[in-house]
Amino acid sequence: MMAVRRRIASTPTRSEHSEPDAADAVLDPHRLERYSRHILLPEIDVAGQQRLSRASIFIVGAGGLGSPAAMYLASSGVGHLIINDDDAVDLGNLQRQILHGTADIGRLKVESARDRLRALNPEVRVTALDKRLDGKELEREARGAQVVLDCSDNFPTRYALNAACVRARVPLVWGAAIRMQGQITTFDHRRTDSPCLACFYPDQPEADGGGCAASGVLAPAAGIVGCMMAAEALKLVVGFGDTLCGRVLLLDIAAMQPRHVRLTRDPACPVCGPQAGTCGSSAVSGNRL
Ligand SMILES: [Zn+2]
């Protein structure tokens, strides 16, 4: 801890940042200790941690992907998490949906999630939305967030959320896990060159095939993808590293082999294509975070 205090106190650029709360964080020993391992990272430091504390992240789905994603974002000190799920906890969820415990069976997932996240980090404000949102409602929530995470398990929600994020020009971190495979990418809709989900999968499948309920999923496969989604969100909020925008990461958990596939924007995409000519203000929207 002392090393952290000394480094922060001696960092000459501290006052040069236009981060009005950074000084408060230095003076708050409780927050300094909680987030010390982040603050030690030059990519995050005090300024990055302050960005996290001011950020709102909208997470759709409090299941296998949403559980680890929300827990890591809460433990990381993201100021406001908005969790949306209309489902209740059942016994079959507990193998991988680690937000919920045996005593939560029958409760709404968002209520269980809120209690778990508050216990993990009381500094984080958690808003629980317990109904399935329509396109306009998804867009409203997306506009209020810096990053959106698609941790849902059905195609109608995924496509509606993608369209909402395209309209709101808010980055969408997208993940999926089934059997022993995972997929993750980021659609950074602040960028003019970012593809969207409909560029990736142009036609929404009529049926979702039952997802992991029909095919099964290795519990840590959901955990790995959810953790990666949280990492993408932290990068987008703080502004370090390279996101998966323009790449899809395919994970074969059985072989423990990752593979990247390039993904480019489809100019004829029915969701983001027609708006291509009106998305030229990326420099402005890019300053959103
Ligand atoms: Zn598209």
Image: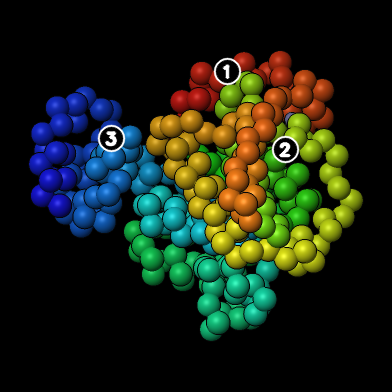
Mark 3 vs mark 1: which is more N-terminal?
3
Bin the neighbour count of mark 3 within 10 Å (Cα to Cα): few under 14, some 14-19, many 20 and up. Answer: few
Q: Nearer the viewer, mark 2 or mark 3?
A: 3
Q: Is residue 163 visible?
A: yes
Q: Is residue 278 above or below residue 232?
A: above
The residue pinned by badge 3 equals 42
* Contact flag, marks 3 and 1 (Cβ < 8 Å): no
Mark 2 or mark 1, whichever is nearer to me: 2
Question: Label 3's element?
Answer: loop
Q: Is residue 132 visible?
A: no
Left or right, 144 with reference to 22: right
Residue 86, by quadrant, is bottom right
Please, what secondary structure does the residue beneath circle 2 have?
helix
Label 2, on which residue? 197
Q: x%, y% of residue 176?
A: 67, 51
Work out whether mark 2 precedes mark 3 in sequence or the reverse, and give the earlier one: 3
Three-letter residue code for mark 2: Leu
Q: Is residue 95 left or right of residue 15?
A: right
Label 1, on which residue? 281
Between 121 and 38, the one lying in front of the other is 38
Query: What secondary structure is marked by label 1?
Result: loop
Between tags 3 and 1, which lies in front?
3
The image shows residue 206, relative to residue 113, as above or below, that is: above
Depicted 243 relative to depicted 114: above or below: above
Q: Is mark 1 within 8 Å of ligand 1?
A: no
- Identify the residue at image location x=60%, y=74%: 94
Q: Position of residue 12 (x, y in %)?
A: 14, 27
Residue farthest along the bottom direction in this orientation: 103
Query: Who's the residue at 71% across and 19% down the image?
Result: 276
Q: CA distance from mark 3 to mark 1?
A: 30 Å
Tell me which amino acid carries mark 1. Ser
For ligand 1, tell me if the residue under mark 2 lies within 8 Å: yes
